Image: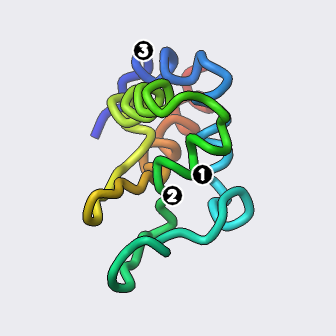
Amino acid sequence: MDIDMIEISKALSNETRLNILKWLKDPEGNFPPQGGCLSEPVDLKGGVCVSSIQAKANLSPSTVSNYLDTLQRAGLLLSERHGKWTYYRRNEETIRRLAEFVKKEL
């Protein structure tokens, strides 16, 4: 899997999108417990519900959804849908490849 440095650079060029990635590095420390709305326990793999991200960012739901979509298109986030809720987590493989690229190429 190659990374698209242009898309990643665009995604990281916004302070809130960068903050979302930082917050998701430590979801337990930055967000309330997740999955309480689900009817049965699910392994969320560190994923955080959109509404929790939106509350922390203090932005409109549509803006946060747009930001999450941008980060996901760049390959920096993964999402899982459980019922009517979508949970986002970092794509650590892409972030590792980004770090390697920066170290080797820049």
| Mark 1: few/some/many CA within 10 Å (<14, 14-19, 20+) | many
- Give above or below for 28 relative to 39: above
Q: Secondary structure at mark 2?
A: strand
Q: Are marks 1 and 2 in contact (CB under 8 Å)?
A: yes
Task: Name the residue carrying label 1.
Answer: 24
Query: Hey, which quadrant is residue 25 in on the image?
Result: bottom right
For the residues carrying marks 3 and 2, which lies nearer the camera in this image? 2
At mark 1, the secondary structure is: helix
User: What residue is drawn where x is 38% and y is 85%?
Assistant: 41
Dot in front, 1 or 2: 2
How far from the left and from the top, in percent, is residue 26?
Answer: 67, 59
Disc assigned to residue 103: none
Name the residue nearer the viewer: 60 or 74: 60
| Real-space Cα separation, disc 3 to disc 2, in angstroms | 26 Å
Q: Secondary structure at mark 3?
A: helix
Identify the image quadrant of residue 43: bottom left
Residue matched to label 2 = 48
Can you give x and y, in whole percent of width and height, for residue 14 in the image?
61, 18
Foreground residue among 90 and 5? 90
Identified by mark 2, the residue type is Val
The percent coordinates of residue 32 (x first, y second) are 65, 65
Q: Residue at x 49, y 22 (%)?
A: 11
| Residue kind at label 1, given as amino acid type | Leu
Q: Residue, x 42% and y 44% (percent of image)?
A: 77
The image's mark for residue 6 is: 3
Which quarter of the rendering shows the C terminus? top right
The answer to whether residue 92 is visible is no
